Image (tube, rainbow, N blue to C red):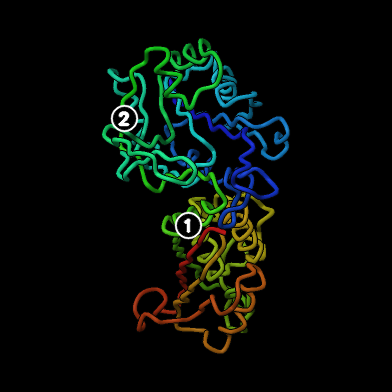
């Protein structure tokens, strides 16, 4: 049995303003809907995602192995029902239903909802925040009375349900409903309230984009990666370090051009992206990489950053060797790395150190390099 998520994004969201519905607008460098989907994709316990879109928006998002696109209906309840129907015949036991406009959702919060719904004594779970402000009634811009706030909550999503029960409830529902909790309760399903998250904001009005942007700044996904590589000296008259060819009485041995500096840096980027190492992407067993220019490896890693919507914030490389001297070539090395990655040289550091004649580098048997990188969302 598996868990699924239905993300509802078929509405027009006119109150938020803008030329596009709110879910397709860009927020801090990414579309709102992309941020929402990414949060659910980070939760390993969710094996299937259903994205419910307006028929006019089907071209805006591509389906994939883990994501199915379904056309929405005339109402929100119709859209959710379409999403639920698309899961019939699967082994889904629990389903989370979420509004795409809540793009600040944290993966940890989703996991907590999942843990709650997996309790065998619970059929439905809904996050909410208790109302703490005074409540008034009003007319013509004047207060006409007060409302007792005891027992009142602000509803949030994702709302989680036993799949079979919420599907049956939606099939029996006549007309639209405020949310899926309302559908569940009309079918007699008991819904447990769990604590919500103030940051789980639903974008409704134009001003909510600024609020969401501030929340996302505090949640910024900063990635750090490190890399380390070693190559022994062998026959040759030059060594290539960080893309720069340096005359020397020996070369470095390796399957590619043995650029120990770029290898460490490339591995650091792959590491920050959780994408393994150079050997995973460019196997040494493949003869096409024999003698390859290591700038190709770095270019691939940098391109992968863009695909995953990250940018390289800074890079730091340390070359560990007794010889050759690195200082005279450090600026040229930074320029090469900048040219390959598109990162300004002010964010690239290449430096060197020795091991005080200790170890294999101290015995001038080879060169080692270590690197670290920081990635930030685009």
Residue 220 in the figure: left or right of residue 328: left
Which one is in front, 92 or 300? 92
Residue 111 appears in which quarter of the rendering? top left
Task: From the top left corner, tell me how far across and down residue 104 is, in percent.
Answer: 46, 47
Residue 283 appears anywhere in the view: no
Percent across and percent down for residue 82 are 59, 20
Q: Quadrant of the N terminus?
A: top left
x and y percent of residue 56 in the render? 73, 34
Residue 356 vertical placement versus 337 (above, below)? below
Residue at image x 29%, y 18%? Answer: 120
* Of 225 and 166, the residue lying toward us: 166
How crowded pointer 2 is (Cα within 10 Å; few <14, some 14-19, many 20+) is rated as some
Residue 370 is at least partly visible in this image: yes
Q: How many marks?
A: 2
Q: Quadrant of the C terminus?
A: bottom right
Residue closest to the eye, 372 or 368: 372
Q: Residue at x 51, y 78 (%)?
A: 349
Residue at (34%, 25%) from the top-left corner?
Answer: 117
Label located before the other in sequence (1 or 2): 2
Q: Label 2: state its secondary structure.
A: strand
- Residue at disc 1, secondary structure: helix
Q: Is residue 40 above or below residue 170?
A: below
Give neighbour class at mark 1: few <14, some 14-19, many 20+ (Cα, 10 Å): many
Question: Dots 1 and 2: beta carbons under 8 Å?
Answer: no
Above or below for 208 versus 266: above
The residue beneath circle 1 is 272
Picture residue at 44% right of the left edge, 77% below the top? 320
At which x and y percent is residue 71?
66, 26
Determine which residue is flagged by label 2: 193
């Amino acid at each position: 049995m598996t868990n699924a998520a239905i993300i509802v994004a078929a509405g027009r969201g006119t109150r938020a303003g803008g030329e596009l519905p709110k879910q397709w607008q860009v927020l801090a460098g990414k579309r709102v809907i992309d941020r929402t989907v990414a949060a659910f994709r980070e939760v390993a316990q969710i094996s299937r995602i259903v994205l419910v879109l307006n028929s006019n928006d089907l071209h805006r998002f591509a389906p994939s192995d883990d994501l199915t696109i379904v056309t929405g209906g005339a109402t929100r309840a119709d859209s959710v029902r379409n999403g639920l129907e698309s899961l019939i015949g699967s082994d889904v036991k629990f389903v989370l239903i979420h509004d795409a406009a809540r793009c600040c959702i944290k993966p940890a919060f989703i996991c907590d909802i999942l843990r709650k719904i997996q309790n065998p004594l619970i059929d439905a779970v809904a996050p909410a925040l208790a109302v703490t402000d005074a409540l008034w009634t009003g007319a013509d811009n004047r207060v006409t009375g007060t409302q007792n706030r005891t027992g009142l909550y602000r509803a949030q999503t994702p709302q989680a349900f036993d799949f079979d029960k919420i599907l049956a409830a939606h099939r029996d529902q006549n007309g639209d409903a405020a949310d899926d909790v309302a559908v569940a309760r009309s079918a007699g399903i008991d819904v447990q309230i769990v604590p919500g998250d103030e940051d789980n904001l639903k974008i409704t009005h134009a001003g909510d984009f600024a609020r969401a942007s501030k929340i996302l700044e505090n949640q910024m996904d900063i990635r750090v990666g490190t890399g380390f590589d070693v190559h022994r000296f062998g026959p040759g008259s030059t060594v290539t370090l960080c893309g720069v060819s340096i005359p020397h009485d020996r070369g470095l041995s390796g399957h590619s051009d043995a650029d120990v500096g770029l290898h460490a840096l490339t591995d650091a980027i792959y590491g920050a992206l959780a994408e393994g190492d150079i050997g995973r992407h460019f196997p040494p067993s493949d003869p096409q990489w024999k003698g390859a220019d290591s700038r190709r490896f770095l270019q691939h890693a940098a391109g992968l950053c863009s695909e995953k919507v990250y940018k390289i914030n800074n890079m730091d490389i340390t070359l560990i060797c007794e010889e050759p001297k690195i200082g005279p070539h450090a600026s040229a090395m930074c320029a090469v790395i900048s040219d390959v990655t598109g990162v300004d040289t002010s964010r690239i550091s290449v430096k060197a150190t020795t091991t005080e004649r200790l170890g294999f580098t101290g015995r001038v048997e080879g060169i080692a390099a270590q690197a670290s990188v920081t990635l930030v969302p685009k």
